[in-house]
DNA sequence: ACTGAAATCGCGTCAAC
DNA sequence: GTTGACGCGATTTCAGT
């Protein structure tokens, strides 16, 4: 679903829409020096090709009561490797888990987790995550300070 | 900048706008069972209070040529603690680094990085990151499989 | 004071050139 | 690739509760 390459204008559009996903088509067209219908066609093409996967409001976690963010490394017990797909389904089902990848290195999975406070994090880890059959080790890295918040993907690297 | 609490309608709105950041006001109003002006006023209030920090298009990294994503744990040499703010500025300046937090645990910083391929990652780590004065240890966790991609913040926890 | 109805204005969107 | 036209949505104002 990614036939041709992206040219400079597509990249400009992507940069703009990452920075301001609600820009109107005419604003966008002006910023990338394109006529409105041209711009519109390109945006739609990018959406249809799946280059643009969607649009989302960025919400401050604290506003929703999430005072704690953490990355959590998960290890699966060797004798439970047959159950990985079930374990992954469990992971996906927890709303506190915002992201999850399998990774190289010391852990099998790396999760991004939000909770109300440290107590809730502790409860989530011990009462929820560690109760998933097959989870062997849980190691959390609590986020202390945000040094660089959610930067857009570079369009010109 | 977060005076009052969020009620159920605000939370519905946030859920909707996280799922579809480009929904028109009337669509949104319909989905949360509100009149258009009401809905509009609430959205604007959420924006002004900083609850909604912005809107962004979600772009597939592969479309921009980023085939590799990794989390990187950074450690700062003890004798360089006086330079942390400079080091952080360096980190922010790398466009390949999408996110960075200071964290508890084995590392001082945890970064999220994208590169074209493994070779570029290796080059970035050795020629760029490790060249930053004060960086002592660099440990990468390469993302293999995406188990749960960028879920919205839960609005009802 | 807060809600919803209405009215205006500008944008999204398509078609024709 | 551009211009123009049409219809719909965004946004404000105002009147009613």
Image: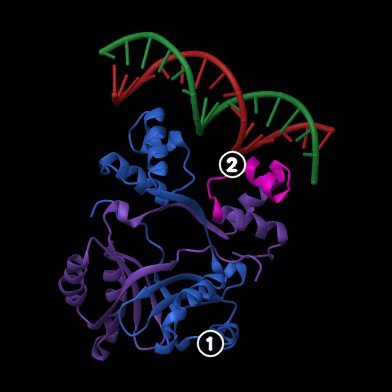
Chain colours: A purple, B blue, C red, D green
Residue B12 placed where, x, y %?
A: 32, 44
Instruction: Specify start and end residues of the magenta stretch as a single range.
Output: A19-38
Disc number for residue B76:
none
Q: Secondary structure at mark 1?
A: helix
Pointer 1: what residue? B130
> Is residue A29 found inside the magenta-colored segment of the image?
yes
Residue A79 placed where, x, y %?
A: 24, 90
- In the rendered image, the vertical position of residue A123 relative to residue B107, given as above or below: above
> Is residue A60 found inside the magenta-colored segment of the image?
no
Q: Gap between marks 1 and 2, in whole Å? A: 42 Å
Q: Main SS of the magenta segment? A: helix
Pointer 2: what residue? A24
Comparing B17 with A51, the one in front is B17
Left or right: residue A154 versus residue B26 is right
Q: Quadrant of residue B124?
A: bottom right
Q: Nearer the viewer, mark 1 or mark 2?
A: 1
User: Would residue B143 be seen by someone viewing this image from the given angle?
Assistant: no
Look at the image and tell me in which quarter the N terminus of chain A lies: bottom right
Q: Residue furthest front?
A: B82
- In the rendered image, the vertical position of residue B94 relative to residue A53, given as above or below: below
* Category of crowding for the residue at label 1, using alpha-carbon neighbours closer than 10 angstroms: few (below 14), some (14–19), many (at least 20): some
Residue A119 placed where, x, y %?
A: 17, 67
């Amino acid at each position: 679903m990614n036939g041709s390459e992206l040219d400079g204008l597509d990249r400009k559009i992507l940069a703009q829409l990452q920075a301001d996903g609600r820009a109107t088509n005419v604003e966008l067209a002006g910023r990338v020096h394109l006529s409105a219908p041209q711009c519109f066609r390109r945006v739609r093409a990018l959406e249809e090709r799946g280059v643009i996967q969607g649009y989302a409001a960025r919400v401050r976690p604290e506003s929703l009561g999430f005072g704690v963010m953490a990355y959590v490394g998960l290890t699966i017990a060797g004798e439970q490797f047959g159950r990985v797909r079930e374990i992954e389904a469990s992971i996906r089902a927890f709303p506190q888990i915002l992201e999850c990848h399998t990774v190289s290195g010391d852990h099998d999975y790396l999760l991004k987790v939000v909770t109300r406070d440290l107590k809730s994090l502790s409860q989530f880890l011990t009462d929820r995550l560690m109760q998933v059959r097959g989870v062997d080790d849980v190691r959390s890295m609590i986020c202390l300070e945000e040094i660089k918040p959610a930067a857009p993907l570079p369009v010109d690297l």
